[in-house]
């Protein structure tokens, strides 16, 4: 029995050729995940250790990687780094605990999303779909930027300069290296300086994902941005969300034009 969902309508043939690489050493979980993802009409490749994961990513060029952290051989952190170094691909990392997720984001491993075990298959599928939509959207945006005759202006807020065309960030003249997800989150925040953005809105804008269970991902990535860019730039509005607020008063005035 095959079940086809409506999401394939706009992507057409592309949807059926979507390849998901699952790197997971627990056979029961790997089998269950592969079974569920296959039911979405995706091709699924499963490997059980870190070295095989790196090799499979290189050989198969998957559209998404679902990556367990605790693996024999080399662990998920290193697998993620090596995969991303060769070719950017959305990575959804499976962790054992919430604080492990925070730790991994803090290390700047470069995964796009995290799920803590045990997780629901429904949520796994929803998050993978969100990652696929983000990839499509990013490709369209890149194409649009490359065809535009006038370059997309950099966002300049205080001493922070966000070059959206080159996807580079400088603070006070020094380049700050962000993961793709951190960059997208910074753009979302910096595009509306001194405005409180709710966690749900950031989740929808950056992750293309709407579910209260994902707001922890937002919190963890904000932590990572603060660690890299400085703690003073992003204000927490408790129970609501976050606001990008440069501390330099003259810069604030410049950015305030239309608030
Ligand atoms: Ca494991």
Image (cartoon, grey):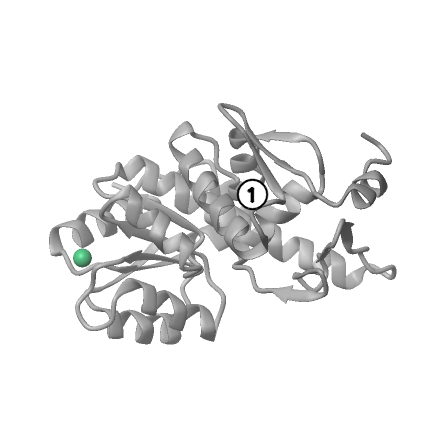
Task: Look at the image and tell me in which quarter the N terminus lies.
Answer: top left
Q: Residues within 10 Å of mark 1 (few under 14, many from 20)?
A: many
Q: Position of residue 194 (x, y in %)?
A: 71, 34
In the rendered image, which residue does mark 1 sit on?
206
Image-based side of 147 in relation to 209, left or right: right
- Above or below, comparing residue 55 to residue 167 in the picture: below
How many numbered marks are there? Answer: 1
Q: Position of residue 93 (x, y in %)?
A: 33, 53
Who is closer to the viewer here, 7 or 104?
A: 104
Q: Residue at x 46, y 51 (%)?
A: 15
Q: Residue at x 50, y 53 (%)?
A: 227
Q: Residue at x 46, y 75 (%)?
A: 86
Circle 1 — which element?
A: helix
Image-based side of 258 in relation to 93, left or right: right
Image-based side of 124 in relation to 70, left or right: right
Who is closer to the viewer here, 186 or 142?
A: 186
Q: Visible in this render: residue 41?
A: no
Q: Quadrant of ligand 1?
A: bottom left
Q: Residue 76's quadrant in the figure?
A: bottom left
Q: Position of residue 248 (x, y in %)?
A: 75, 45
- Above or below, comparing residue 59 to residue 199 in the picture: below
Q: Visible in this render: residue 258?
A: yes
- Above or below, comparing residue 239 to residue 105 in the picture: above
Q: Position of residue 172 (x, y in %)?
A: 71, 60
Q: Residue at x 41, y 61 (%)?
A: 109
Q: Residue 80's quadrant in the figure?
A: bottom left
Image-based side of 149 in relation to 113, left or right: right
Who is closer to the viewer here, 71 or 239?
A: 239
Who is closer to the viewer here, 63 or 51?
A: 51
Task: Look at the image and tell me in which quarter the C terminus lies.
Answer: top right
């Amino acid at each position: 029995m095959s079940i086809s969902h409506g999401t394939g309508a706009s992507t057409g043939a592309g949807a059926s050729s979507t390849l998901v690489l699952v790197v997971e050493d627990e056979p029961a979980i790997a089998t269950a995940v592969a079974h569920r993802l296959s039911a979405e009409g995706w091709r699924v490749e499963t490997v059980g250790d870190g070295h095989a994961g790196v090799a499979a990513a290189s050989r198969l060029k998957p559209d998404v990687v679902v990556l367990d952290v605790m693996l024999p051989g080399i662990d998920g952190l290193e697998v993620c780094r090596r995969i991303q170094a060769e070719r950017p691909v959305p990575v959804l990392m499976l962790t054992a605990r919430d604080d492990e997720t925070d730790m991994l984001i803090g290390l700047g491993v470069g995964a796009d999303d995290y799920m803590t075990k045990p997780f629901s298959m429904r949520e796994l599928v929803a998050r993978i779909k969100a990652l696929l939509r983000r990839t499509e959207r990013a490709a369209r945006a890149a194409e649009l930027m490359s065809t535009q005759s006038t370059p997309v202006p950099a966002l300049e807020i205080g001493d922070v300069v966000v070059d959206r065309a080159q996807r580079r960030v400088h603070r006070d003249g020094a380049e700050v290296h962000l993961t793709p997800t951190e960059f997208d989150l910074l753009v979302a925040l910096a595009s509306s300086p001194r405005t409180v953005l709710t966690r749900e809105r950031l989740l929808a804008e950056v992750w293309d994902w709407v579910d209260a269970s994902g707001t922890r991902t937002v919190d963890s990535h904000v932590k990572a941005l603060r660690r890299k860019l400085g703690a003073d730039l992003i204000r927490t509005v408790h129970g609501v969300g976050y606001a990008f607020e440069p501390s330099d008063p003259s810069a604030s005035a410049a950015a305030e034009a239309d608030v």
